Image: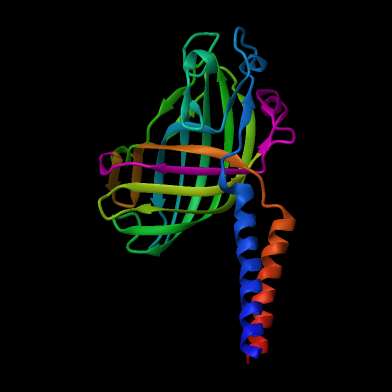
Amino acid sequence: MKTSLIRKGILASAVAATLGLGFAPQAMAVPGVFEVSPNNLGLTGYSPFNANQMLGNSSVLLTALDATHETGSGWINFTSFTLNNTPILAGASGINLGGANSYALYITFDQAATLTTGTINTPGSSGVLTSLNYTLWADVGSDSVFTAAQASTATAATVAQNTADKILATGSLLSGVNGINALGGAFFNSVTTISLTADGSSYFTKPIPFFELAFEQFNNTSQGLEIVGNLVSINQETGSVDFNRIPEPASLALMGLGLLGLSATRRRNK
């Protein structure tokens, strides 16, 4: 009888823990759908559209400060939107069409990282991000000039604005990792906050309120990597950004109750 009761207690607690673990990530599992209204940038002829991912390419110049710390800055130039992996055509989104009735969408950022594995800024190395701050811009008229990073000439990755661009959002690091794999391919993954400006709220028109989290992931091949002394330039890096909400407190509480149930059962067994 005691054995049967113990088994039932373990099963009930395990189910509770599994439900908690299952529900908590559920709020973040699928990239959130958002609505974009290009006409609110001052353009004409575009209808609002839905997307759940922004695709682009990036460039960054990293500087090793010592054996374990690096800093860097760069940009991400967004090239398209997708909805459930289906591309949104440029004619519908208005992005990168060129001309006065078009716009570019880009991020400028700075970052810092601490080495955790390998030798800093060499193949086989990886680290954790210790800071990341970014600004999301809309370049109406697509007249900003992007300069790619180049380690051999100590050229930073910069964006020169010919006319003032609109700030749509800002954000900072929650967690992230970066590094260079054994084949020389760079990788970058992070979770950041996102805070829309007034211009951003007129461009990203739904949901209201907008999402709290942004997820960034970018990768490249060894062709886009250049290492010269303590400088590393990373180009041809492609990836995506999507958004979601912070997990609901009720989901996190359910997970906690499940774990408490397992703990109580173990104490009874002892």
Q: Quadrant of the N terminus?
A: bottom right
Q: Is residue 213 magenta?
A: yes
- Is residue 215 left or right of 233 when viewed as pictured? right
Residue drawn 54% across the image and 8% down it: 100
Residue 265: percent from the left, percent from the top?
Answer: 66, 82
Q: Nearer the viewer, residue 229 or 93?
A: 93
Give residue 268's position: percent from left, percent from top: 68, 88
Q: Position of residue 127 (x, y in %)?
A: 43, 59
- State the extent of the magenta-drawn residues as a range: 195-223
Q: Where is the C terminus found, in terms of image quarters?
A: bottom right
Q: Between 268 and 219, which is closer to the camera in this rendering?
A: 268
In the rendered image, is residue 78 in sight?
no
Across the whole image, how many numbered discs are drawn on residues? 0
When asked about the image quadrant of residue 57, the answer is top left
Instruction: Identify the residue at image location x=61%, y=81%.
Output: 7
151 to 200, vertically: above or below: below
Q: Is residue 55 left or right of residue 134?
A: left
- Residue 182 part of the magenta-drawn span: no
- In this view, 262 is above or below 154: below
View extreme (front): residue: 1
Is 67 drawn above or below residue 84 in the view shown? below
The picture places residue 242, in percent across and down from the top left corner, at 55, 38
